[in-house]
Image (cartoon, grey):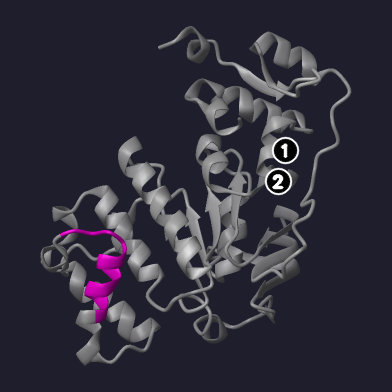
């Protein structure tokens, strides 16, 4: 490993006239946190286009009244990629699950609003959510094998999704399944359709889940740690696939990740979560070049050794 990668560096904004990005050591970073911080940024210039989905002032609480998410606001626009970062337990996944109408049992939205394509779903019933979930907003999660039936061939599961979610007639479901997998760059499609979960790699299973999530051509896709468990090569291929889908379909993407390098590569905007709140947000390049909150700076320090700087030039 190079000396630069081994020293756990932190990116900061250079004050020179050329405005280059400079590097500081962890000790310098800790010292800088004690200086007057920049003001955390929030969604500058992101209101140019109308949001296709989002939450506003979202509060999520347990049955005993304990709040887990405190007044979070989040929105995404057609063709945009929004990154959501933060440590485990910071409220990222709960916020996304509220946007999908699938909060865990015992939790509920107690404040704020949830909207998809202008439709207020804050108090929607499960029946109402079924007209939106999968059709207008889809999702893929980490560990794709846990979302598929190991006993049923992949093709049968994808065809069922097409019939139930997209309303594709049974006679057309198989050909449509082939088209979906082919569009996602899967080779030997007919073989994959006959195979079961145990016969496919993690990257292939994630492509299958993406195909299922896109079966009804939704406007929004939530990818919650969808590339975390994959090796670097497969991760890069999936990120390029998501970028292509955004370009070709105008798909709005919410990318939840602990990997700031991935977010820097893919997303135009980023929100930083901590303890159930958004502590900073705005244009990705600005937030990651000149973070205004100490927690954002600590995340950058923790990730600098993984080559984040090459995406911030």
- Residue at x 10% of width, y 64% of height: 191
Residue that label 1 marks:
286
Of 1 and 154, which appears nearest the observer? 1
Residue that label 2 marks:
283
Of 205 and 100, which appears nearest the observer? 205
- Residue at x 61% of width, y 30% of height: 313
Q: Is residue 178 magenta?
A: yes
Determine whether 284 is above or below 151 in the image: above
**Residue situated furthest front in the rendering:** 18
Residue 311, percent across and down?
55, 33
Residue 62, percent across and down?
65, 59
- What secondary structure is the stretch in magenta mostly built from? helix
**Quick one: SS at disc 1?**
helix
Q: Is residue 210 magenta?
A: no
Determine whether 144 is above or below 77 in the image: above
Location of residue 124 (image quadrant): bottom right
Tell me the crowding category of disc 1: few under 14, some 14 to 19, or many 20 or more residues within 10 angstroms, Cα based. some
Question: Would residue 197 be found to the left or right of residue 303 on screen?
Answer: left
């Amino acid at each position: 490993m190079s000396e630069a990668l081994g020293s756990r560096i932190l990116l900061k904004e250079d004050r020179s006239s050329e405005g280059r990005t400079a590097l500081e050591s962890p000790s310098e970073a800790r010292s800088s946190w004690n200086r007057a911080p920049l003001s955390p940024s929030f969604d500058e210039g992101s209101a140019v286009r109308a949001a296709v989905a989002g939450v506003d002032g979202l509060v999520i609480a347990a049955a005993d009244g304990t709040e887990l998410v405190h007044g979070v606001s989040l929105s995404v626009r057609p063709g945009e990629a929004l990154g959501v970062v933060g440590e485990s337990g910071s409220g990222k996944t709960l916020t996304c699950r509220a946007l999908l109408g699938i909060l865990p049992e015992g939790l509920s939205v107690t404040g704020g609003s949830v909207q998809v394509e202008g439709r207020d779903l804050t108090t929607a019933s499960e029946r109402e959510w079924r007209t939106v979930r999968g059709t207008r907003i889809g999702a893929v999660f980490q560990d794709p094998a846990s979302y598929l039936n190991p006993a049923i061939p992949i093709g049968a599961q994808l065809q069922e999704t097409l019939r139930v979610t997209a309303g594709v007639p049974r006679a057309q479901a198989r050909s449509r399944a082939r088209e979906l997998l082919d569009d996602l760059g899967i080779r030997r499609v007919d073989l994959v359709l006959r195979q079961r979960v145990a016969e496919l790699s993690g990257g292939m299973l994630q492509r299958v889940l993406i195909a299922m999530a896109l079966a009804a051509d939704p406007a929004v896709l939530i990818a919650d740690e969808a590339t975390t468990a994959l090796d670097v090569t497969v991760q890069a291929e999936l990120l390029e696939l998501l970028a292509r889908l955004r370009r070709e379909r105008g798909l709005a993407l919410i990318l939840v990740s602990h990997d700031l390098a991935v977010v820097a590569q893919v997303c135009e905007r980023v929100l930083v979560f901590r303890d159930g709140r958004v502590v900073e947000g705005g244009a990705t390049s600005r937030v990651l070049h000149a973070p205004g909150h100490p927690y954002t700076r600590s995340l950058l320090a923790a990730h600098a050794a993984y080559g984040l700087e090459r995406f911030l030039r």
